[in-house]
Image (tube, rainbow, N blue to C red):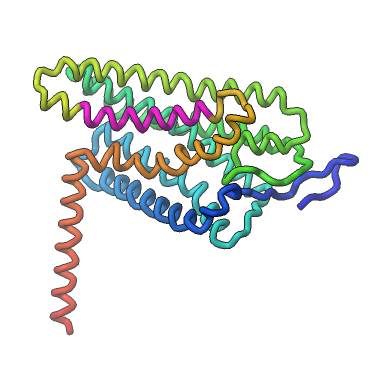
Amino acid sequence: MADPERGNRTSIMGFILLGFGNFHELQILLFPLFLVIYVVTMAGNTAIMVLVVADQHLHTPMYFFLGNLSCLETCYSSAILPRMLASLLSGDKTISFAGCLIQFYMFGSLLSTECCLLSAMSYDRYLAICKPLHYAALMNSGFSLQLAVGSWLSGFAVGTITTCWVSQLIFCGPSKIDHFFCDYTPLIKLSCSDTSQMVLVFFLISCIFLLPPFLLTLTTYMCIISAILRIPSSTGRQKAFSTCSSHLIVVTVFYGTLIFVYILPDTAALRDLNKVFSVFYTVLTPMVNPLIYSLRNKEVKEALRKALSKTVTSMNICKQFCGHLL
């Protein structure tokens, strides 16, 4: 796992992801649980992407952002869950240094991108509800594309910077990472380099990419709720609240757990909870986002119904054609 380098120090060639080793009695249940979550996540997000691309009625800024979010969640889950499932099934917890860096890079880039993208989505809803007369002019296809591209570029720029910095560190051992993926905090603790400057810079980056997007998202939803309260129809208010409250709960859980893990001080009491909270934004959020943001939407459900109807019709035609040939 290591080779001699720089005097008495050694450079780690790989790591051991301890995963959920503290929950030995649950190990037998974790594999089927996370497998089901991964399948549901991939199926839900893939369905949203296909519908947004295929259905002309969904070619609007709102669904454009939803398609981007689903694409992100698909990549996000695939960066973590397959490796974790393989480890739970085989018992092999080792990961190479290069593999760890790649996972760290993909996770960090996609996480930063999601923070920006959720803010763009909340701003889109704010304009649609609070400024409906100006929505078409303010949120046109060009501006929505700029917001989406800016989110992806910003996220991967942050991922590139932090990964390049981490790759320059020297890891002397032990090689055990007390986590189920290569995250920043448990990884940086294994380095024998001077990380004080890096810790400070990463804290600043975390604040920049977590707090402003969270506050912007929270502010826009407060404005949205204020606008909903002014709706004269009680049925209209209830319907709008039902959708917005679900969105707000998911966003609050996502940002809340991120702030808990990456911004609050690293104390022994909080350290034990970090792994549990990490499950929320790495595993659960990608699974529920399609349900909360899209599959409860009337237009998406109608597009899904049409797509299923066309699929069934095509299958019936194919059956009839094959029957005639036989």
| Number of numbered markers | 0
Question: Is residue 321 placed above or below 61 in the rendered structure?
Answer: below
Residue drawn where x is 75% and y is 44% of the image: 174
Q: Secondary structure of the magenta portion, mostly?
A: helix
| Residue 110 x %, y % | 48, 37
Is-magenta flag for residue 253?
yes
Q: Position of residue 131 (x, y in %)?
A: 22, 17
Magenta part of the protein: which range? 241-260
Q: In the shown orientation, is residue 173 left or right of residue 308?
A: right
In this rendered view, identify the residue nearer to me: 220 or 230.
230
Q: Residue at x 48, y 24 (%)?
A: 210
Query: Is residue 184 covered in magenta?
Result: no
Which one is in front, 86 or 154? 86
Q: Measured from the top left, where is residue 16 in percent x and y? A: 67, 50
- Quadrant hosting residue 171: top right
Residue 35 in which image quadrant: bottom left
